[in-house]
Amino acid sequence: MYIYSYENLSKMSQTEKGKKYIEKFKTYYQDNIKDKPINNLSFSNYKLFFSAGDRKTFETQFFGKRARLTVLQVLAISDDKYIEELEEIIASICDEFTWIVPAHAYLKLELFSTETARMLAETLYVFGDKLSRIIQDRVRESVFNKVIQVYENNSFWWDSTDCNWAAVCGCGVGLAYLYLFPERFESVKDRLFNTFKSFLSGFDEEGYCYEGVNYWQYGFTAFCAFFEIYEKLCNIRPDFIDSEKVKNVICYVENAKMSEDIYLPYADGGYPTWNMDANSAYTIKLLYVNDFAFNKVSEFLPSHAGLGLRGLVGTVTFDKPEKNLFKESSIYYKKAEVFIRKRKKYSFTTHGGNNGIIHNHNDVGAFQIVKNNERIICDFGAGLYTKEYFGIDEQRYKIFACNSLSHSVPIVDGELQMYGSQYKGEILNQSENSIVIDIAKAYANNPKNIIVEYQTEEDCIFVKYKCKGIKEKITFHFVSDIEPTVKESCVCIKDVRLLCNLPIKPEISHRKERPHNPARKETDNIRDVYLIDYEVFTNNEIIAEFTFQL
């Protein structure tokens, strides 16, 4: 029996584990959906992006409707009384004037239009004649007109890109074919498979994801969602999805884990705290049952990605997440130049690389220290997504989250790091406990050297700067989630003592900034961020040594 058939899913929903899973959806339904009208997407809200750069107003309603579809899709598996509401949200989504969010209006097909097609196609495939004939016809017509026909008559930049777009769009289009138009699939199969191969090319051979953990989850989950269905419907498993490189991609997220809830902070995929959502974890596990292990995952989260049925299958199929003990390790991604040292007391990471990667932040040489599941030294993470955030570089890098002010790197003669792949670091040495990087080339004002040595010992981290070619001053700049206090001989960040060999006291400043909201919640949190600055005036060589006593 096909794993996503209505009969199979219905049986799963009546098991002990299935009932517990369904109860989470019922609670969400009671709190957020029941007796609340479906929002119609207005063109006036759509235009806000173009007039004010506002993504949030339209997208909150857009993604809220898809989360509603996800919830009703799951509830209707367990009880036919939800079918009528399921039909209502399907009809409303089919009637939308566009499935493309305004930030992507320049495209004919993109992430969320293809995702919408997949969700509707899967709903129709699973529920079949449980849905009225009018709704069935409306879904087929809408998916064909808004996605299938557009795909067949055009080519897209994401056909051959190496980022999450390839996997998400490929999955959306591919499953729309497999579910609704299987007779047309062979004609596009090679094109789709090449798109998935392009997605994999964005990881290096060691499996490193330049976009960060959240985008790793988004793209790789879509990749797995497609090939799990392809394998089950077509009874074929392509060789390339089981390559050694893919095994390394699977390991990336565990390597990136720095503590219970904290991961690598780099690019727009970095967040103060993060855990993989359970539905994504199960989607990956269902395809890579022997290769993918996960321990902590986030609680139930209805999502615009619509993976609720996979969460149901995963909940019933697998035991509780594996209990992986946090192990001491030293990890170095050679091509990405990312160094990770995990010890019993703390975790540390820094990287070289360049300031021209996808979802880039200007952060060559930035580092993060995590102790007791808190970010002692960090970078802010992804900022609030707006038109300017993905606008021209001059706009993007005026934003705190993207420029180097939100990262623990020096400010040289009043200048921050510059954007572009030519602005980069040079790895001079790397070992199990240390890494040495010259970050001078990350600045446009041409300092001769800014060599940073990071040494990770059992109870201390030493950060040593050797600088030449400074014209007037250099500011050694550190960022923390935690409010520091200045003592006579050190700076205290919780129980961590920061000492400096220079006879100067730092200046502490405080900012409130809006982070990116990947869950598309109606409200955005404002986060506190603290900056620690040691300003040194010099026109000569300087050596600055900082000790973090942990």
Image (cartoon, rainbow, N blue to C red):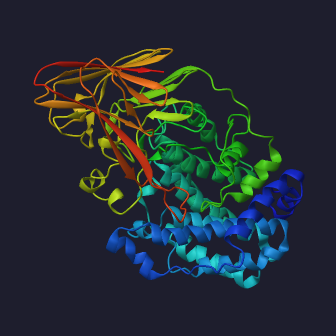
Q: Which image quarter is the N terminus in?
A: bottom right
Q: Residue at x 55, y 79 (%)?
A: 96
Question: Residue 234, percent across and down?
Answer: 72, 54
For this rendering, which residue is in front, 365 or 352?
Answer: 365
Question: Residue 150, percent across and down?
Answer: 49, 71
For residue 45, above or below residue 308: below
Q: Quadrant of residue 415?
A: top left
The answer, for residue 173, to whether it is visible in the render is yes
Q: Residue at x 54, y 52 (%)?
A: 167
Q: Quadrant of residue 307?
A: bottom right
Question: Residue 136, percent across and down?
Answer: 71, 78
For residue 383, above or below residue 84: above
The answer, for residue 356, to whether it is visible in the render is no
Point out the residue furthest to the front here: 488
Q: Count numbered badges in the picture.
A: 0
Question: Residue 446, percent across and down?
Answer: 15, 32
In the picture provided, is 249 more to the left or to the right than 481? right
For residue 35, above or below residue 335: below
Point out the residue furthest to the bottom here: 134
In the picture provided, is 75 more to the left or to the right than 411? right
Q: Residue at x 10, y 29 (%)?
A: 471
For this rendering, which residue is in front, 480 or 166?
Answer: 480
Q: Residue at x 42, y 70 (%)?
A: 102
